[in-house]
Image (tube, grey):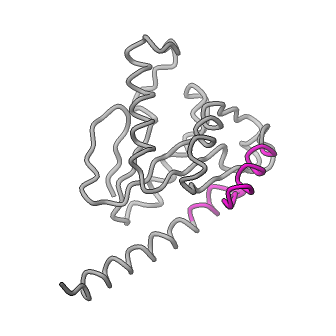
């Protein structure tokens, strides 16, 4: 597993790439990204993590601000290049009540056709919107980060088995 945090450069190098979209809330949101990285440490994946080592909570959210522009473009490029996007609005019903994640709502709407994996527990202030949009696009909504990670690991295991089979049985 390789993790790359914003705004660092990366190369997919043929690796299955996962983008971690979700609540940051100006660094007030829970740091769920480290749980994903820990859970996937044994997998041959590239994880693109928009949460910087040092979050710039005082960064002006203006298009002409170079740091803001760099962050948003890095995130947009990462989501567009990823094989899978994880949208995490909160990790549990207990943490959902404190999560806002307005940018995550915007990004989810932008990437519904990409069939992302979505975690949106009870208690999230816009859960109805998330549930309905995901239903319309045939996307399962997980009620906890643990449930999403369990399914993600199974999905990665299948991909790994397929790649190993394809590598040993490929004929030209």
Q: Residue at x 50, y 68 (%)?
A: 153
Choose top left, top right, bottom left or bottom right for residue 69: top left
Give left or right: position of 144 versus 161.
right
- Residue 53, given in percent of the width and then of the height, sits at 39, 32
Magenta highlight range = 127-149
Q: In the image, is residue 58 above or below residue 81?
A: above
Front-lying residue, 62 or 33: 62
**Magenta stretch encompasses residue 139:** yes
- Residue 161, given in percent of the width and then of the height, sits at 38, 80
Q: Residue at x 39, y 38 (%)?
A: 77
Q: Given the current orientation, which residue lies at the most extreme left position?
A: 172
Name the image quarter holding the C terminus.
Answer: bottom left
Q: In the image, is residue 165 above or below residue 129?
A: below
Choose top left, top right, bottom left or bottom right for residue 127: top right
Q: Residue at x 68, y 56 (%)?
A: 137
Give the dominant element type of the magenta stretch: helix, strand or loop. Answer: helix
Q: Residue at x 73, y 34 (%)?
A: 98
Give left or right: position of 157 versus 143.
left
- Residue 92, given in percent of the width and then of the height, sits at 71, 50
Give left or right: position of 145 versus 52.
right
- Residue 108, given in percent of the width and then of the height, sits at 61, 43
Name the image quarter holding the N terminus.
Answer: bottom left
Q: In the image, is residue 30 above or below residue 37?
A: above
Q: How many marks?
A: 0
């Amino acid at each position: 597993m390789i993790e790359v945090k914003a705004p660092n450069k990366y190369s997919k190098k043929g690796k299955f790439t996962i983008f971690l979209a979700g609540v940051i809330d100006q660094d007030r949101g829970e740091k769920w990204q480290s749980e994903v990285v820990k859970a996937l440490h044994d997998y041959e994946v590239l994880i693109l993590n928009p949460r910087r080592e040092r979050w710039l909570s005082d960064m002006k959210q203006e298009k002409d601000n170079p740091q803001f522009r760099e962050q948003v473009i890095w995130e947009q490029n990462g989501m567009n290049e990823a094989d899978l996007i994880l949208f995490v609005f909160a990790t549990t019903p207990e943490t959902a009540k404190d999560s806002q994640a307005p940018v995550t709502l915007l990004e989810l709407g932008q990437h519904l056709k990409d069939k992302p994996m979505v975690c949106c527990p009870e208690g999230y202030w816009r859960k109805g919107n998330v549930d309905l949009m995901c239903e319309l696009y045939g996307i399962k909504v997980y009620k906890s980060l643990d449930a999403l990670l369990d399914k993600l690991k199974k999905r990665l295991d299948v991909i790994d088995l397929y790649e190993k089979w394809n590598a040993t049985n490929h004929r030209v």
